[in-house]
Image (cartoon, helix red, strand yellow):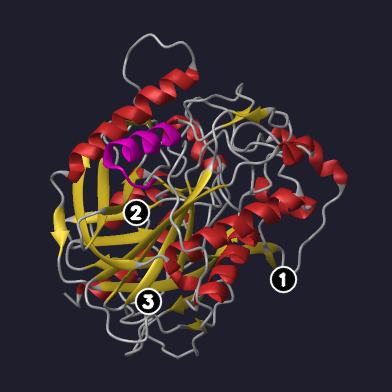
Amino acid sequence: MTTRRLPLLTVPLLFSLACGGSDPGGSTGGTSDSTSTGPGTTDNPNPSVASTDAPTSTSPTSPTSTSSPTTTDDPTVATSTSPGTTTTTGDPVDTTTTTSGDTDTTTGGPVDGFLVGVHTSDVSPTDMHLDKNVYMGAYGAPFTRGPAQGVHDPIFARSFAIEGDGGGIIMAIVDLPGMGNQNTRAVRQKVAELTGLEESQVLVGTTHSHSAPDLMGLWGGVPGDYRDYINEEIAQSMAAAWDARVPATLAVATVKAPNNNRRSWGFTDDDMIVLDAKDLDGERIGTLVNFAAHPVILGEDNKEISCDYVGYAVQKIEAGLGAPASLFNGTLGDATPKVPEGMYADDFARAQAYGELLADIAVAAVETAEPIDDGVLAWSHTEWEQGVDNLLFNLAAGLGILQFDFMSQGLSQVVATQSTYFRLGTQVQGAAFPGESLTRNGLAIKEVMKTPHKMILGNTGDALGYFIPSDEWQTGKNDNYEETVSLGKTAGDTARDKINAMITADNANF
């Protein structure tokens, strides 16, 4: 990788671009753009297609076994946790990693039903960290908001590990605006070392709270010791969740919940998917909720670390169900909160009202959840390189303030990104999306899924800004705000096609 250093005279331009903006309900992110390969896709994307106090699990230690790599050229779904291989096409701006498996399992033998473990870790900055300037992310230009002045409510890493017949994955959701790939790579490598899993089985996501520390480097960043601390805590939480696995039953429900679309579409992805795990004695292990809405109820004027509405939602879900819970954001690119009408003392009260409304819906949904009864966990993984067309990100990378690795190819830059797909039985299909997918982009992925319950884990695996369908690019929606924080016009189509290729390959298996 070669990073171009740009002269300091570019700083005024960088600031004038206002990283992420501060529009109501606005958000920010990183980057993306490239081409697509694999079954069900073409080399050129089709532009017309359309928190809180929480209980913590025990078992902090983790196995340290490793696996030997296997090789495959087909983007088929894994039937074990055997590692995959990386294949590179002749186009230097397109690499694909696919994972498939043979007969090995993580536990050393066949898995009868599911194994599930959870873990929660407080990753809030300490006073010592705050004294060194912890900047919050997702509003305004770099440094203009000023460093955080305290912690209003703790932020967490919440980990949910599932193993079934076919392999296992660990999903962690962290109360952050996003994480640069330097950080997520460090976490995945550490978890792989601790558990013996492949890095492709480790899914690190962020809630996208606009009142949490900037682990992307776009708004001022965080002290190095806090960065090291939070990366280590996330990795240890994920390993502890894996180590805490016990035989379990899984149940799933999909219901509707209120949100808005800020790009003036008359619809958005308003599905809330609830995945509930119990041990074989019927005791709840944990609950994972997947729903799309930007955590932007707290505005740019807030100077205290907070989970926004997500924290209030998780806290009430845990109180109602009596076990750890997590909330993964979904197709959040143009989805914003729909706060109940009323008189509120401040934005924190508004965030609490919305979070608790979502919690009530999630708790009620558990009562209607259907069992996932065949114990299958199929998964696959793909990687590709996106071209970085956005001048803002090129300048930020050149100035060395981003916590992302961009690679120079001639006069242009690319960034490597990824997605992991998974299926639970014949009831649930899900995909980690490497940024903020707009509604129509996300729905085009869900349309390919065959199962009744469909999950998109937004800002998971990467945090590369907005992914916009090419036929929606710069059509005046929301004053083209999202386009200013996207890597480019083809990014949405490419990610969609890459993910849909994995889904299509697996659809033939059930």
Total labels drawn: 3
Pointer 1 residue: 1
200 vs 275, nearest the viewer: 275
Q: Would you say the residues marked 2 and 1 are in contact, meaning their CB atoms lie under 8 Å apart?
A: no
Counting residues from the N terminus, which is met first, the one under dot 2 or under dot 3?
3
Q: Residue at x 53, y 26 (%)?
A: 23
Q: Amino acid at mark 1?
A: Met
* Residue 483: image location, x then y, percent: 52, 42
- Say which element carries label 1: loop
Q: Residue at x 74, y 34 (%)?
A: 143
55 vs 24, nearest the viewer: 55
Q: Nearer the viewer, mark 2 or mark 1?
A: 2
Up the image or down, 469 lies above or below 339; here it is: below
Pointer 3 residue: 38
* Residue 67: image location, x then y, percent: 49, 86
Whether residue 313 is in magenta: the answer is yes
Q: Residue at x 26, y 43 (%)?
A: 272
Cα–Cα gap, marks 2 and 3: 20 Å
Residue 26 bears which disc, if any? none
Cα–Cα gap, marks 3 and 1: 26 Å
Q: Amino acid at mark 2?
A: Ile
- Say which element carries label 3: loop
Main SS, magenta region, reads helix
- Say which element carries label 2: strand
**Would you call the spot at circle 1 few (<14 residues within 10 Å), some (14-19), or many (20 or more)?**
few
Cα–Cα gap, marks 2 and 1: 31 Å
* Residue 179: image location, x then y, percent: 59, 52
Q: Which residues are magenta?
A: 310-326
Pointer 2 residue: 456
Counting residues from the N terminus, which is met first, the one under dot 3 or under dot 1?
1
Up the image or down, 392 lies above or below 422; here it is: above
